[in-house]
Image (cartoon, helix red, strand yellow):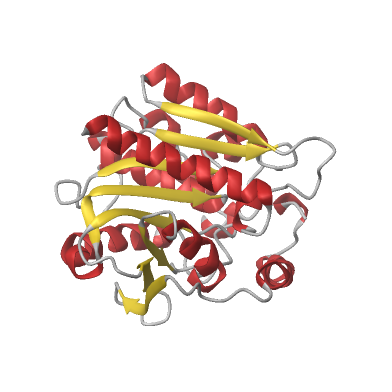
Amino acid sequence: MEVNDLESPEVFRKSATATDDARDAGLQTPDDIVRYDNIRYGEDDKWNLLDVYHLKGVGAPQPAIVSIHGGGWVYGDKERYQFYCMNLAQRGFTVVNFTYRLAPEHIFPAALEDVNRVFVWIAEHAEEYCIDKERLFVVGDSAGGQLASQYLALLTDETYRKLFAFTVPDKQVRVRGAGLNCGVYDTKQDILDNENGLLQYYLACKAEEYLEEMDTISHITDQFPPSFIMTCCHDFLRHHGEPMYRLLLEKGVKCCYRLYGSEDRPEIGHVFHLDIRLPEAKLCNDEECDFFKEILEQEM
């Protein structure tokens, strides 16, 4: 079901819950993974919780991935992303998987503030959880892709940062790269085209009042992290992927673009990479993590 077909957050939550339950049925924590669950990173004891995963035997800081979940700004939590994130950890990263406040109960910029709180937490607690805060990567999909690209623009463009009230820990952490997966990036244009979908609930039905804050792509500079941008043939947000790739190329940012699946494979759809049993998901996640490792190797 496409976001624009949905009538309300409640309808979307019910549909997404059923889909995610079916996707993850039977999955368990892998035997080779150590997990630290329900760590408080902010003031809200319900929403400001995170998990950390890494391989057994890891005893020192290593490259880490921060995962920003999707869900149309109104749905999702770390439990829905635990198996995907542990799967990434099996590729040799420490992974931070967190829940953030959702709309319509918590409106803009609550989710973005929570992303920042996670990075503040990392700056303060990295060594305790085998996180190298100088070698961080960010992945986000769907609405999480929007939040990821927006936060990375904040980290790398001082002008954009001034539009927001919170302080980013840009001198205490270093993001080396990003994975932007089936995401929304040009949210300003979506607002102007009246294609808000569930975004209207995050923006409290006042989308036109937030055009400047939601204009992420105008604040992407050559300092934006190298990015792996992916979508698939049957992704209803596919039209966001290639323009973002071309924008980054124009800015001189190292990036690559991948289009997965084929027209005759409708089951390879939006955020397919979360279904870790799919061969296409394995390929995508392998290639994304290889992109991250290549960045580190080139900087050695």
* Residue farthest bottom in this picture: 45
Residue drawn at 72 percent across, 39 percent down: 261
Between residue 278 and residue 200, name the one nearer to us. Answer: 278
Q: Is residue 141 above or below residue 176?
A: below
Q: Which part of the image, by quadrant, shows the N terminus?
A: bottom right
Give the number of callouts: 0
Between residue 59 and residue 201, name the one nearer to us. Answer: 59
Residue 260: percent from the left, percent from the top? 67, 37
Q: Which part of the image, by quadrant, shows the C terminus?
A: top left
Is 259 displayed left or right of 106 in the figure? right
Q: Is residue 198 above or below residue 170?
A: below
Quarter holding residue 284: top right
Is 181 displayed left or right of 277 in the figure? left
Residue 12: percent from the left, percent from the top? 70, 65
Whether residue 167 appears in this view of the structure is: no
Between residue 255 and residue 192, name the one nearer to us. Answer: 255
